[in-house]
Image: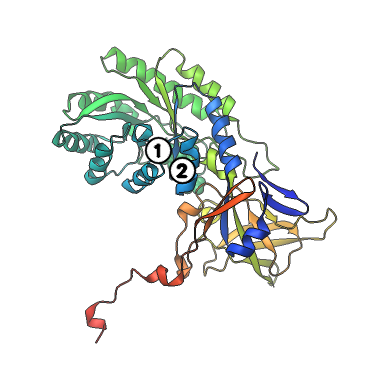
Amino acid sequence: MNHFEYRGGVLHAEEVPLDKIADEVGTPFYCYSTATLTRHYRVFAAALPKTALIAFSVKANGNLAVLKTLGNLGAGADVVSAGELKKALAAGIPAQRIVFSGVGKTKEEMRIALDAGIYQFNVEGEPELDALSEVAASLNAKAPVTLRVNPDVDAKTHAKINTGTAETKFGIPWSRAHAAYAHGAKLPGIEIVGVDVHIGSQITELAPFKAAFERVAGLIAELRSKGHRISRADLGGGLGVPYRLDNAPPPDPAAYGSVIAAATKHLDVQLILEPGRLIAANAGILVSRVIYVKPGESKVFLVLDAGMNDLIRPAMYDAHHDILPIREPQPNAPRQRYDVVGPVCETADLFARDRDLPEARGSDLMAIMTAGAYGSVMASAYNARPPAPEVLVHGQQWCVVRPRMTLEALFALDRVPGWLEH
Ligand code: LLP
């Protein structure tokens, strides 16, 4: 459920008409709904025990205003770089609610995270364990560690976001899990606190979660029998969202919570979850204006002023995003099949192929739905297009939470070497 609805013939974000924002901010822009972020966080939290740490995956949406909205509700943060860590801290999320994931943490990043006093490191391999121990020992500290294990479970999602099978780079191979724990327990800068798993993203069935969590529960029992103190189970993120309103929705957080409860009920561990998409995806849209309706040989192209540099998901994952006109169409309005494209000089700059939409005209406003996760964060300045600004709505209020970058700022950091100046 989200708070983007037609009212009086115009799509609104909560109580704000989106055409009004477009007039003031220009297009394209991202628009997030506080009420939707809040609702998703609360529904997710309600499906889990009160002691669980819900660490919002900052990679899904890193805007400080979004992070602060979630932090104020009690969310922690799952970060994968020093940059994300600093953003989470800047948004007021306490270090003791921050977990640090990722396969390539540098020693410098480890130092920054240890100095900040984060809750835990999710360590993905033996060399990383050695490096972390070295850094922590040099600071006379012990790093709280969960080892991310790779359960070799197929999450049945898009190949580019499937992370829990043996051939991906993620986690410690299942066959080496015990050896890695034994190694970690001997290192001076490491304090083993738990087990971590994350099998992928946009997962729309419960079976892969169930399989992975049961494997992890079994591993925890075995590790304890070998004397390891396992007090936390970080079960990652990955629960999918409905991108298409005409498809059956993915399992809801309550059903996911039941799978977790069943797998972990006898373990007496603190649960940590790292949802990203589930919280943010349907809380954001990308608003864009039609530049041209361009007839082709056999197709009609709707050329938008947003491009793959603003939202790369369709180009990268063949992702489907619903597209709605900001002006509500009459029920009997004529319809047309369009290829909805952006202005970027790439054939892949295509938001939707053969999409049946109400007939559109140049300068019409369109909303690309379910764009609040992995939208703005993945934007680039390709084709020297400044990434779209971001707006946060709260009831009748709205605020530009990241302004449009000026064209001058876009290349202000470029430097021309001396030998070209003469
Ligand atoms: N934890 C870890 C360790 C992760 O790698 C991820 C996502 C999450 C949590 C959050 O997963 P979520 O709840 O959002 O599914 N750019 C892709 C998605 C990449 C996901 C990467 N890892 C997309 O647009 O579909």
Q: Quarter of the image containing the N terminus? A: top right
Which of the two residues, 151 or 85, is positioned nearer the viewer here?
85
Which of the two residues, 275 or 312, is positioned nearer the viewer here?
275
**Any part of residue 341 in sight:** no
C-alpha gap between disc 2 and disc 1: 8 Å
- Identify the amino acid type marked 2: Leu
Q: Position of residue 249 (x, y in %)?
A: 65, 36
Left or right of 232 on screen, residue 71: right
Q: Position of residue 89 (x, y in %)?
A: 36, 42
Q: Residue at x 59, y 65 (%)?
A: 26
Label 1 SS: loop
Label 2 SS: helix
N-term mark: 2 or 1? 2
According to the image, label 1 marks what residue? 93
- Identify the amino acid type marked 1: Ile
- Relative to 241, say whether 371 is above or below: below
**Disc number for residue 67:** 2
Q: Residue at x 48, y 47 (%)?
A: 65
Q: Quarter of the image containing the C terminus? A: bottom left
Q: Position of residue 16 (x, y in %)?
A: 66, 51
Contact between labelled residues 1 and 2, with CB atoms less than 8 Å apart: yes
